[in-house]
Amino acid sequence: MSGAEKIDVTVTEIVAVNELVTRFKFERTDGGLLPTFSGGAHTVVEMKDGAITRMNPYSLMSDPMDQSAYTISVRRDDEGRGGSLFMHNNVSVGDKMVISYPVNLFSLDLRAKKQLFIAGGIGITPFLSQIKQMERLGGAWELHYACRNAALGSYVDELLSAHPYEAHVYYDDEKQAIALEELLNGQPVGTHVYVCGPKGMINWVRATTEKLGWPREAVHYEEFLAPQPGKPFEVKLAVSNKVIQVGEDESLLEAMERSGVDAPYLCRGGACGQCETRVIDYSGNFIHRDHWLEDDEHASGEKIMPCVSRFEGKTLVLDR
Amino acid sequence: MTIQFNEETFRDDYTFKNSDWAIQRFPFPFHEDSYMYSVNMEQHRGGPEGSIYEKRFDVDEHYVAEMRDRAMVLADDPLRCQSLPHMTLAGWDLLELIMVSKSEDYPDLFELHRDGDQWRWVNKPLGIDDTFTFLDETTLPYGPMEYITRQAQGDFCVLDQRDDNLWMDAGTVTTQADWSLDFDIGMNFFEWHAPVPLAHEKGIFVRALKFLLNIQQGSPARRLNWTMTVNPLLDTSPENYHKWGIQKTTITPDNIGQKQHLRVELQTFFRLPRSNALVFPIRCYLCNFDDMMTMPKWGRRLHRVIRDLPEELATYKGFIDNRPMMLDYLAKFDDGLPTSPGIWPDKDSEPPLQA
């Protein structure tokens, strides 16, 4: 069995946070306690969407020490393959679902003298649990959170009222922007920076910290990619001796699973490296979308991350 | 089952002994008639009833005596237990993991009563009954890691995970096979494994690290490792090499069966929830050659493994000088018959030694 351990849960609360974001609360179906976790961890939620089982990662935003329930926030993606739409449209209070044990690919460096959080949009969610962890354990932190506008600023009111000195909010519509260089230059030695948000924001923070000479180890980022739809393609799986079709709205990993192939995975968002698969033969073009492989590996045609990457062409043979 | 705890020592007069029960459940580490490094990891999810794999943290007849020996080592050398400042949360994680596991797995020996952050811990074998506040260090006599590892057999390395590496940032290490926490503290996975021969060339450590970084909550793993120790010494540390190293010269053909011990480490790995650190318990089991030879399969196999072991490994494991004497002894227990696969003694199916 691939992936982290599973937990049977029941949806006990659904709250529309704003026009795009909905919050879901999960409690153990057997009434027991959920595992504690570390701030920044995610869970993989399984969705039975007709014949397809989708498994999407969502950051846990509840208090890591609260074992009674987990909460996640899901942003609706009207252009996506339907995972977030399924959560928004098909999940009701009382539904039974399966989620994974917490996995953390974005954990706090507890050596830091101060934690500096930079969030964009729905990228706020891992910081919500990290802030609760920092508040519980003590320690300096600061949040700079950019949103499109006040109406779409998830959890802005809660953050500003609970943490008026630590939380700073910026609205794009009001031409407010994080003064990043100033912010970074003003930090005490030993500060660690964490960024979660759109790709452009992550690149901006990484490039700016590099330019300012920040140690690479002090800069942390997380970007989960949702698998994007694409043209259907055919894959031959050499080890399993199967030829499978990857549909328009499913990922290569999902298609393998649908065909009964137990492929390894963890984050399902192109970040963790677990599903890395060797390419035996191909004729066509890869559409690499992961953060795991290096550029030269992408160019080599020798590896693919089936959770987010696709293929267009005549032949693709994988070592799976 | 209630365990009868041995009155025994691991130093000076060496009264350590294994009961028949302990010999039968000894974790003989060789699954075939030869040995080479491998990552050899498996899930740590129970095992045959009564085996050392059954519980998350095995408690056996040596528990009370081992804890007494640890207290003596720590009294002589407090640096055997260290925790860098950022590892305190991981120490609480470990305390919780051990208390919950032991109270669930051995309810007749250990009790944990929790009311929010107010915890009461009862350890009957050691006569401890303490009440404290979880996550408040001032309510315990030691830091959380030291407190609980003074009550748990085996060494404990608590590894921080960052920058795609593991860091030896905390631990209690008093029963080690010739390595030093005080020397390794703060090192990363490749740094502290630098002295190991052959394994680097085989890429073992790169693969092992990748595996360990991906151990997740709820999915602990385990493996066995081994070496040789003369006399039933738990503390074979570099700090005390001047005391125990010389003892390797005291074995003779007459006493080797009693003095020479196979030292097996049950290594387990658990992801710690609040800190995202990894704890690496290393539990040491000792068995002398005479006791091991009561299992015909182990007698045949141990001879073949020791005979064919590459010289670098016999040197690294510290018994190259004594290997000829070991082989003289072991050859008498190898009649050339085939052995069954796997580590278990298979007493019912392995024939007795053929004269």
Image (cartoon, coloured by chain):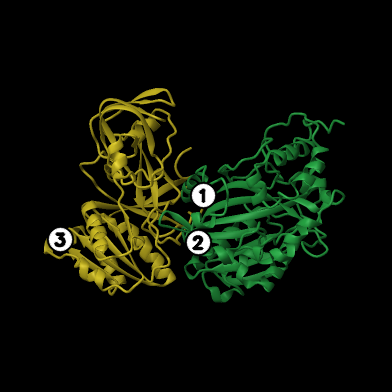
Chain colours: A yellow, B green
Q: Is residue B256 above or below residue A207?
A: above
Badge 3 vs badge 2, beta-carbon distance below 8 Å: no
**Which residue position holds label 2?**
B187
Position of residue B175 measured from the top left corner of the image (x, y, whole percent): 67, 60
Q: What residue sits 31% from the left and 35% below the top?
A: A251
Badge 1 sits on which subunit? B
Asked if one can make out residue B282 in the rendered structure from this viewpoint, the answer is: yes
Find the distance from the CA under tag 3 to the CA under tag 2: 44 Å
Question: Mark 2 or mark 1, which has the lower sequence index?
Answer: 2
Q: Taking B45 as reference, is B146 above or below it?
A: below
The disc at residue B2 is none
Name the residue at 20% across, 41% down: A79
Which of the pair A87/B79 is nearer the observer? B79
> Which chain hosts label 2?
B
Crowding near the residue tagged with mark 3, few <14, some 14–19, many ≥20 C-alpha atoms within 10 Å: few
What SS does tag 3 mark? helix
Mark 1 is on which residue type? Gly
Categorize mark 1 by other alpha carbons within 10 Å: few (<14), some (14-19), many (20+): some
Q: How far apart are labels 1 and 3 at the CA level?
A: 42 Å
Percent across and percent down for residue B83 are: 54, 68
Residue hosting label 3: A172
Quadrant where the C terminus of chain A is found in the figure: top left
Q: Foreground residue, A116 or A317?
A: A317
Q: What residue did someone put label 1 on?
A: B218
